[in-house]
Image: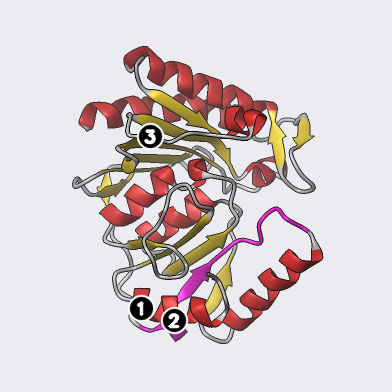
Amino acid sequence: MDHYLSVAVDAAKLAGKVIAENFYAEKHVEHKGKVDLVTETDKACEKLAFEHIAKTFPDHKFIGEETTALSGTFELDDSPTWIIDPLDGTTNFVHRYPFVCISIGLTIKKVPVVGVIYNPILNELFTAVKNGGAFLNGSPIRVSSQEHLGSALLASEVGVKRDKLTVDATTDRLNSFLYKVRSLRMSGSCALNLCGIACGRLDIFYELGYGGPWDVAAGVVIVQEAGGHIFAPSGEEFDLTKQRIAASNGLLKDSFVQALKETNAL
């Protein structure tokens, strides 16, 4: 596991350097959807990370946001599989808002076992391996100790769909939650929201309809190793292939699931 982690960290730092070098530059922006963006940096970072890891693990499989976005499909099996989001928070990147990162996760037998998330703009490197703890820049991290939902800081995202049915359901749900929690944050990065849970900056998080497993594969390991819970918004077991996730510290899961059910976040 330490070897897997070392190679993933090196790949993240290589890609992070490219992100940092282009952060304030003019961007060539393409649209994958009405508000879902991709830049040349996304593509370059994915290629760089894939090639670096493949040099050491040529028999491993790879799933990346940009390559998968082109084909529209992915297959996750029991083989060691690297799942990479080369630039989570592309809209932030385009607007020079500093919540951007590369996310690199490794699954074995479909279970996330290594997670590396690197924000080169804020110089924050989150790492974890299964049964090995979670770390921020080499120092151990733990989830918060908040016990009361009403005092919890919630993170969520609006998502990329802009049809009226989806937008109305999303805003109604968020409006309901504002009566149940202390406050709400939206960072624009699913991966960094999960890191926020892991290091205790956030207490609870959910997102429905995110892009794919590349958004969460690394963050799942980091949250779990920091003492947090990962689950489906319905309260059932989390499925990496579904686009629905909830996370909490070690104390708020039950009350959070109840609140999610009350807002129909199933």
Residue density around tag 1, few if under 14, some if 14–19, many if 20 or more, within 10 Å: few
The residues bearing labels 3 and 2 have C-alpha atoms spaced at a distance of: 32 Å
Amino acid, disc 2: Gln
110 sits left or right of 232 in the view: left
Q: Residue at x 63, y 75 (%)?
A: 174
The residues bearing labels 2 and 1 have C-alpha atoms spaced at a distance of: 6 Å
Q: Which residue is denoted by mark 3 in the rendering?
A: 77
The x, y position of residue 94, in whole percent, is 71, 40
Tell me the element at label 1: helix
Tell me the element at label 2: helix
Q: Nearer the viewer, residue 188 or 60?
A: 60
The residues bearing labels 1 and 3 have C-alpha atoms spaced at a distance of: 31 Å
Q: Which residue is denoted by mark 2 in the rendering?
A: 258
Residue density around tag 3, few if under 14, some if 14–19, many if 20 or more, within 10 Å: few
82 sits left or right of 193 in the view: left
Above or below, comparing residue 150 to residue 232 in the picture: below
